[in-house]
């Protein structure tokens, strides 16, 4: 049975892989983007060409008015959101002593506050329907920390505490809330690290390579399915053994 899914930051990288995987599973997918309308349109075309249903929806998910408008658009065009993937995220790395307040606030707003606002907006209809799936994309940085990423790690650790608390609030209504925490995944973000850093990251895993967005999307797809109804408040680490 297909559901209505919303993927924030769904125009590229992990978000794109998740959107395409959910579309292939028969869900109608709203592909959220902030600036790259062309990239979101490409994801929508990919889903539709495979026989799925999808729409692009632009919104800065760190802004409350934009989130409200986004949910109104999705509701009118696809139906009420039943599967929410909180994937939108940015980095503004730097040592804490040199980190400006703007860089701290922006990362927390996009990575964490957006999950609060989107989850709150989705929960109203999920509670009425007594079914829902909320999956947030965290990071191993939120579990172990990472030098130069105090803001990013704090936002991802916050997602874990947020999700565990929310899972306890809404579990009796048939709604599960979980986190998928990737390690080093081959995306545009890791491409900017340079060859030396990428090789070092690969060697730090047990499997000796970076992960793929599709491997993260597989974990998300499972947690969003009916079969995962007894899994909630959990953090599924997809890191190739990095944290071992």
Image: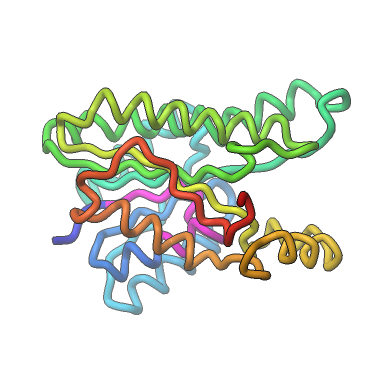
Q: Residue furthest front?
A: 244
Q: Is residue 48 visible to the viewer in this orientation of the structure?
A: yes
Does the magenta run of residues contain 182?
no
Colouring convention used in this rendered image of the protein:
rainbow
On the picture, is 92 further left or further right than 210?
right
- Residue at 48 percent across and 60 percent down: it is 216
Q: Position of residue 98 (x, y in %)?
A: 88, 27
Q: Is residue 58 visible to the viewer in this orientation of the structure?
A: no
On screen, residue 157 above or below 208:
above
- Count of all numbered marks drawn on residues in the image: 0
- The one nearer the camera, 234 or 58, is 234
- The one nearer the camera, 123 or 165, is 165
Quarter of the image with the N terminus in it: bottom left
Q: Position of residue 173 (x, y in %)?
A: 15, 31
Q: Quadrant of residue 150?
A: top right
On screen, residue 3 above or below 195:
above
User: Which segment did they paint magenta?
Assistant: 5-19
- The one nearer the camera, 241 or 220, is 241
Q: Position of residue 42 (x, y in %)?
A: 48, 69
Q: Quadrant of residue 3?
A: bottom left
- Residue at 42 percent across and 60 percent down: it is 18
- Residue at 33 percent across and 72 percent down: it is 48
Does the magenta run of residues contain 7?
yes
- Residue at 41 percent across and 73 percent down: it is 46
Q: Position of residue 50 (x, y in %)?
A: 33, 78
On the picture, is 139 further left or further right than 162?
right
């Amino acid at each position: 049975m297909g559901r209505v899914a919303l993927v924030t930051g769904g125009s590229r990288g992990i978000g794109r892989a998740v959107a395409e995987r959910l579309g292939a599973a028969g869900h109608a997918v709203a592909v959220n983007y902030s600036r790259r309308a062309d990239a979101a349109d490409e994801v929508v075309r990919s889903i539709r060409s495979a026989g799925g249903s999808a729409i692009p929806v632009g919104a800065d998910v760190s802004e409350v008015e934009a989130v409200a408008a986004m949910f109104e658009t999705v509701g009118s065009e696809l139906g009420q959101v039943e599967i929410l993937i909180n994937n939108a995220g940015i980095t503004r790395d730097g040592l804490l002593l040199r980190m400006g307040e703007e860089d701290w606030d922006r990362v927390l707003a996009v990575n964490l506050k957006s999950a609060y606002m989107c989850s709150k907006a989705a929960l109203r209809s999920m509670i009425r329907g007594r079914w829902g799936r909320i999956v947030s994309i965290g990071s191993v940085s939120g579990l172990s920390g990472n030098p130069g990423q105090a803001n990013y790690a704090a936002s991802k650790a916050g997602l874990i505490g947020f999700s565990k608390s929310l899972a306890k609030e809404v579990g009796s209504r048939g709604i599960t809330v979980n986190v998928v925490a990737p390690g080093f995944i081959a995306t545009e973000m890791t491409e900017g690290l340079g060859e030396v850093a990428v090789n070092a990251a690969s060697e730090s895993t047990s499997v000796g390579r970076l992960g793929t967005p599709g491997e993260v999307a597989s974990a998300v797809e499972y947690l969003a399915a009916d079969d995962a109804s007894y899994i909630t408040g959990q953090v599924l680490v997809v890191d190739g053994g990095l944290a071992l």
